[in-house]
Amino acid sequence: MSDANRAAISVVGSLNIDYFTKVQTLPTPGETVSSRRLELFRGGKGANQAISACRQGAKVYFFGCVGEDEDGVAYRKALTDEGIDVSHLNRVSTKTGAAFITVDDSGENMIVIAPGANDRLDIDDIKAGRDVIAGSRAVLGQFETPLEALVEAATIANKENIPVVINPSPIKPEFPWHLIQTDYLIVNEGEAVEVLGFAPLSEGEATLRQRLHELRVEYLIVTRGSDDTLLFSRTGMSETIETLPVLPVDTVGAGDSFAGCFTARIAAGEKMEDAIRAANCAGALTTLGAGAQDPIPDYEKVDQHLDHLSSKS
Ligand code: RIB
């Protein structure tokens, strides 16, 4: 597809080198355990989401920072090869971000982030890309880069009536929700409780509506692993949207794959429920391989599985 026919989206976020170890049981504080293997992958929530959106056909503009090290150079090339525009991916004089990920035999994981270059993204970097953001059909961000940069991008998008999609991971209680309008808030069940202050299904509809109103969130999307996804709106609508049953190998990056796919499909004009159904498939398929990025599916693969879902329902 030519660039002119692809919906443009701006992704503001992180890039990490993921150091991935697999253990039988996660260590407790003070304990040392041995890993059966160490693998290195490219990751970071921002880049994972950008790749997912790009593989769904979006023209992705990435706003972030890598270090002036070999990892940064290689990461920029990998994103370019993927088809992502890196004109707003800055090189800064520190190390590229890293994530230390340990997964146990039950699939439970622990992640420690060393943000490095990610922490250097600032408001001026976003302002320098104002026209790109204003020309996008959606803006997508997470919480692994400085929050003020995301607020700036969302503010530009709000002024232009461009949908803002936020995946508030990892949770930062200080995020100033009141400063921006969030059109789609994508959370897992734990994050939903952290952001709302209660589980979405534990309170009545009026309480949830009031909370979404306070947070200035239009739609709340709650992913639940192998369970169907929940959708709520500020006006009181709620729905459950089916997901693809799979046997996961590695769940790291599944939520990012969901967010990127959802945003790309919304930007391309799909109905919200259809975009969520596709994102459910993308997230589930991402759990079938190792690392966050390699297993992220493309548009055709998601659509094949959507056909399978609809033939079952
Ligand atoms: O969501 C998964 C990502 O979280 C990993 O790729 C890791 O880099 C951390 O940012």
Image (cartoon, helix red, strand yellow):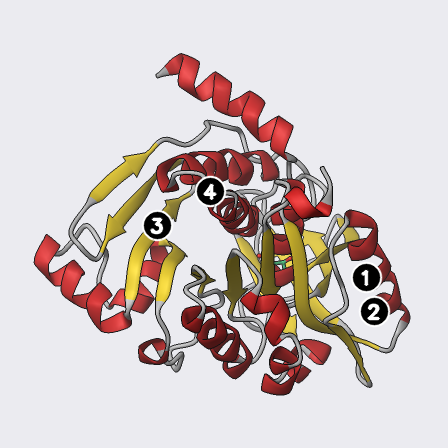
Q: Quadrant of ligand 1?
A: bottom right
Residue 202 visible: yes
- For the C terminus, the image quarter is top left
Which residue does the image show at 46% across and 28% down from the upper left? Answer: 244
Disc 2 vs disc 1: Cβ atoms closer than 8 Å?
yes
- The residue to which callout 4 is attached is 269
Q: Residue pushed farthest front? A: 4
Q: Is residue 258 left or right of residue 208?
A: right
Which residue does the image show at 55% across and 50% down from the upper left? Answer: 260
Mark 1: give few (<14), some (14-19) or many (20+) Cα within 10 Å: many
Identity, as a three-letter code, of the amino acid under mark 1:
Tyr
- The residue to which callout 1 is attached is 75
Residue 222 disc label: 3
Identity, as a three-letter code, of the amino acid under mark 3:
Val
Question: Residue 16 placed where, x, y %?
Answer: 71, 65
Query: How many numbered discs?
Result: 4
Q: CA distance from mark 4 to mark 1?
A: 30 Å
Q: CA distance from mark 2 to mark 4?
A: 34 Å
Q: Mark 2 or mark 4: which is in front?
A: 4
Q: Is residue 294 above or below residue 215?
A: above
Disc 2 vs disc 3: Cβ atoms closer than 8 Å?
no
Q: CA distance from mark 1 to mark 3?
A: 31 Å
Mark 2: give few (<14), some (14-19) or many (20+) Cα within 10 Å: many
Q: CA distance from mark 3 to mark 4?
A: 21 Å
- The residue to which callout 2 is attached is 72
Identify which residue, 125 or 302, lies in the foreground. Answer: 125
Query: Of marks 2 and 4, which one's residue comes earlier in the chain?
Result: 2
